Image: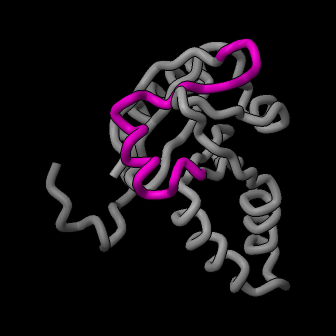
């Protein structure tokens, strides 16, 4: 499980150095093979290859004539790029994906259980404030799956 928030600098080539606390797990679970694709919140999603393959299998089984399913397939599978973590724990984020997420120099890596999100540092800070504000004013009920969740 990947959790926590890390601030990281991209190098001049657009490489991100994976924090040491995640490297061994990524090497063990997927031999350093990862997939980066677009996220739906103008961030990137980083998956260990086996995790992404599971999601990909589910996405390709969605009905081809359903507009939302087709959009998800185009976005998530269409932008998916396989990468490898090198011996120094770095991987290259392809330029089109960096451009999509507005990644310049300072990025935030956010653990999400089975994956990571990669955010521009300023975009992450703005979104986090917005989400907290929305939670304080939102009257929407939790879905039934979360009724028993105690924080």
Which residue range is magenta in the image?
11-33
Quarter of the rendering containing residue 78: bottom right
The residue positioned 38% from the left and 52% from the top of the image is: 113
Q: Which of 57 and 88 is in front in this view?
A: 88
Q: Which of 63 and 9 is in front in this view?
A: 9
Residue 143: image x %, image y %?
A: 36, 68
User: Does residue 81 appear in this view?
Assistant: yes
Colour scheme used in the picture?
one colour
Residue 114 appears at what percent x and percent y? 43, 56
Is 110 covered by the magenta stretch?
no
Within the image, what quadrant is residue 121 found in? top right
Q: In this view, does 124 lie above or below 32?
A: above
Q: How many marks?
A: 0
In the picture, measured across the screen, residue 140 lies left or right of residue 151, that is right
Q: Residue 140: where, in percent of width, then height?
A: 39, 56
Image: 99 above or below 135: above
Q: In which quarter of the image is residue 42?
A: top right
- Residue extending farthest to the front is 87
Q: Nearer the viewer, residue 147 or 30?
A: 30
Point 60% across, 47% down: residue: 45
Please indicate whether residue 67 sits to the left or right of residue 111 in the image.
right
Is 19 magenta? The answer is yes
Q: Residue at x 84, y 36 (%)?
A: 96
Q: In this view, does 9 lie above or below 119?
A: above
> At 75% from the left edge and 71% from the top edge, which residue is drawn?
68
Percent x, y of residue 100: 78, 35
Given residues 129 and 71, the one toward you in this image is 71
> Is residue 136 at least partly visible in the picture?
no
User: Can you say whether 114 is above or below 25 in the image?
Assistant: below
């Amino acid at each position: 499980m990947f959790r926590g928030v890390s601030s990281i600098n991209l190098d001049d080539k657009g490489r991100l150095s994976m924090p040491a606390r995640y490297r061994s797990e990524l090497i063990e679970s997927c031999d350093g093979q990862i997939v980066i694709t677009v996220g739906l919140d103008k961030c990137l999603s980083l998956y260990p290859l086996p995790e992404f393959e599971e999601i990909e299998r589910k996405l390709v089984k969605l009905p081809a004539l359903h507009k939302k399913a087709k959009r998800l397939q185009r976005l998530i599978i269409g932008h998916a790029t396989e990468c490898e973590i090198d011996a120094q724990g770095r991987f290259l984020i392809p330029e089109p994906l960096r451009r999509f997420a507005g990644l310049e120099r300072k990025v935030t890596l956010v653990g999400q259980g089975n994956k990571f999100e990669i955010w521009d540092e300023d975009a992450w800070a703005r979104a986090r404030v917005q989400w907290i504000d929305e939670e304080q004013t939102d009257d929407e009920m939790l879905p039934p799956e979360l009724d028993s969740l105690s924080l």
